[in-house]
Image: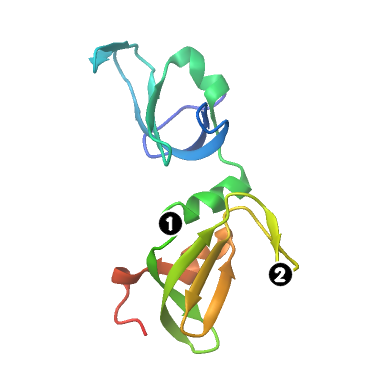
Amino acid sequence: MAYSLKAGEECEVWSSSEKKWVAAMIDEVLAEARMERGHALPQGAVKVVSAVGTKYLYPNQVEKALRRLTDSSKAISATMRFSKGDEVEIWSNSKGMWLEGVVDEVNETACVKSGFQVPVGCLKVTSAVGHKYVPAEKADGMLRPRNEGMGGA
């Protein structure tokens, strides 16, 4: 790998069970060898956490199973904190305030809905004024968990 790995760094890890790259975070890079749940982990092993689970990569696996985020996957990681059914607040430009809403969908693949291209990571959120598709790259500015607000709607 052409760069050093640091705990807290966002990345993508290959998921054998999902058969695709998934957004993840490096939890730990082992400074020295140790035993973990009966497994000998060498120095340099990387502990990675994703929505799929937690896994350790041996140093010889890192180059093939771990990669830096692309711009699109950085945007997708912004939506990882939201799931279908989550109660949120969504910013309404027309009302000039935060409204209570619910995440109806998190698009895992690009698709067409009602004649519109919906990109990967896009969230469909329903509020009192209807539903809105929130692109992943705008999620941080337009959505927040409902309990995070200062009064909401």
Q: Is residue 92 above or below residue 117?
A: below
Q: Nearer the viewer, residue 4 or 40?
A: 40
Indicate the position of residue 92 as horizontal and vertical percent values: 50, 82
Rendering quarter of residue 21:
top right
Give the image location of residue 101, x and y in percent. 42, 74
Q: Secondary structure at mark 2?
A: loop
Image point 42% across, 42% down: which residue?
Answer: 51
Quadrant holding the N terminus: top right
Which percent across, then down, holds residue 73?
58, 46
Numbered disc total:
2
Q: Is residue 76 left or right of residue 58?
A: right
Task: Report x, y in % for residue 50.
Answer: 42, 38
Instruction: Give residue 130's quadrant in the image.
Output: bottom right
Whether residues under marks 1 and 2 lie with C-beta atoms below 8 angstroms apart, the answer is: no
Amino acid residing under circle 2:
Ser
**Residue 47 makes an appearance in the image:** no
What's the mark number on residue 114?
2
* Image position of 152 with respect to 122: above or below: below
